[in-house]
Image (cartoon, helix red, strand yellow):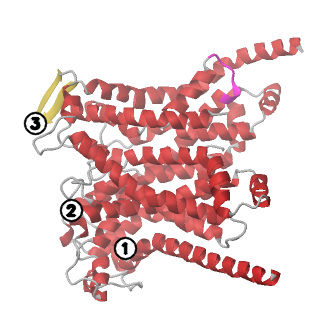
Amino acid sequence: MNSNANRNAKIKLFISRFVVYAILIFLAFLCLFFFWLMFVNSTRSNAQLQSGFALFPKENFLKNFYNAWHDGTIDIPTGMKNSFIVAICSALLTTYFSALTAYGTYVYNFRFKKAVHLFILAIMMIPSQVSAVGFIQLAFKFHLTNKLWLLIVPSIAAPAVYFYMRQYLQATLPLEMVEAARIDGSNEFRIFNQIVLPIMKPAMAVQMIFSFVGSWNNYFMPSLLLNDAKKKTVPVMIGTLRSADFTKFDMGKVYMLMLMAILPVMVIYIILSKSIIKGVTSGSVKG
Amino acid sequence: MEKMKKLSKTKSISYAKWGYIFIIPFFVVYLIFTLYPQLLTIYNSFFEYYRDGLNVIGPNFVGLRNYKELFTINNAGYVPIVKYSLNTLILWIIGAVPQFLIAMLLALFFTSTRLNIKGQQFFKTVIYMPNLIMASAFSMLFFALFSQVGPINQLLQSWGAVNEPINFLGMTISVRGLIGLMNFLMWFGNTTILLMAGIQGIDESMFESARLDGSNSTQVFFNITMPLLMPIFIYVFITSMIGGIQMFDVPQVLTNGKGTPNLTSTTLIMYLNNFLGVSKNFGMAGAVSVLLFIITAVLSAFVFKTITRK
């Protein structure tokens, strides 16, 4: 009787495990399938692509890579260079200044400390598109379209990154440490740069990655501000590719361009997936 | 004790100026690049101000006329802001319903000690991956894969499932479905990870005592997991809604900015984007932005309450 019930429970567990793994494998397949097709198609010639469906790579990878890299209409090397400039500079500025601001409202007591903190939290969720109209108007007025720095500098004021840094400081930085450094005679900037920043390294790294990915993928603002082919970033070029006459394209090259567009982020993800996934939860609310 | 307090107070006053110095860069940049453009946006919404060919019309003060235009039936027979809001809502729902159902399910699977799922790190890594992919490139990929000569149609034809290629990008249902599918793929991994962290944050003894009371897993879910997870669930849900309102890259690239067919996949931000293109209609664009701001502000109030809760 007892062993029978035990066996039933075991069978039930086996079946539920089987179903759960089947669901997980299906979802994992769904996440990878489209990217696999993109990769496979980036290794096929235009003729092979017209002739039918394929599930495995062919031999034209390098040829497509060469063609895409030297394409006359979509200048992907320039696009990637511009994207790297914007993404790296934004990542550095946003993490440094967010940490600085968070440190400012955490360590020092000043009259509007609480108000400043709450204000930044309150503006955190306002979408950037809401200021787009005025931003574009000013950019045209002062002839600042096609200037990459205009996409970089605003990242100094990033409320969400500030919030993350502030949470991190609260959890890791003992105020006694700052006091001790003051007694040693360090000035405030040196304390921040040489004592606090090293402590914040893990938080800085996570936010640098997310910020890099965010700017690398950013499409809305750059598509409105960049129309000079020499200044376009990768997403803007993808948009241009979409609006071009598709039928005339070598499709192998088109798939290769898409692969190039997502490759840097893919590489970062493959190397750092563990800390990225950890970073997803640490920035949000604590229950 | 009293003396110490006084001492530390005078000390903090002497350092107060550093607090201001450290937050100056943030606020200077915020004022110039965000707040001033925002105020200018609101200001614009009360003006007739656009480009017609080479001529710039305005700015002429027109009061609430831009807003009135948004809420009035146009020549094509619909109320613009209503149509595009509904489009955005529908597109968000198509992606968000499976996103939250599946994410909830996966979060329960991953945290179940009974199931004891192996390879969690692998599954999490794979399902989170689409979230980091450039949305415009992802959308471009779907356009290429689902076009009439694309691999999906080739596959369906080689199976004999269809005789003629399906025009996925010409039908409302399939365009909306594809946008929903992309949003689902991009976001369910992220939601899973957040809900999982929420479940793991619940005190283990709550589950223990429920099990000792003889509750089955359904009862545990509805009586313990769900109520205790609620604050996090609401936070994730509302941030997803705010993200939904900003939906742009995916439908923009998939339909080449046209919201085909018949503007049924034009979202609010695509509508805004159209005003900022050639016509530079800052007046109308301003009015759309103000409405967007109001909607997100209401939703943000909930998020604000969650994160400032002690």
Crowding near the residue tagged with mark 1, few <14, some 14–19, many ≥20 C-alpha atoms within 10 Å? many
Q: Report the side of B154 relative to A165 (left or right).
A: left
Residue occupying the point 72% across, 69% down: B114
Q: Report the Cα–Cα distance between label 3 and label 2.
A: 25 Å
* Residue denoted by label 2: A244
Residue A245: image location, x then y, percent: 18, 65
Quadrant in the picture for the C terminus of chain B: top right
Q: Nearer the viewer, residue A133 or A68?
A: A133
Q: Report the side of B233 relative to B275 (left or right).
A: right
Residue occupying the point 34% across, 54% down: B91
Query: Which comes sooner in the sequence, label 1 or label 2?
Result: 1
* Residue denoted by label 3: B54
Q: Amino acid at mark 2?
A: Ala
Q: Are marks 3 and 2 on the same chain?
A: no
Report the disc number at residue A249: none
Chain for mark 3?
B
Query: What is the chief secondary structure element of the magenta stretch?
Result: loop
Residue occupying the point 64% across, 51% down: B198
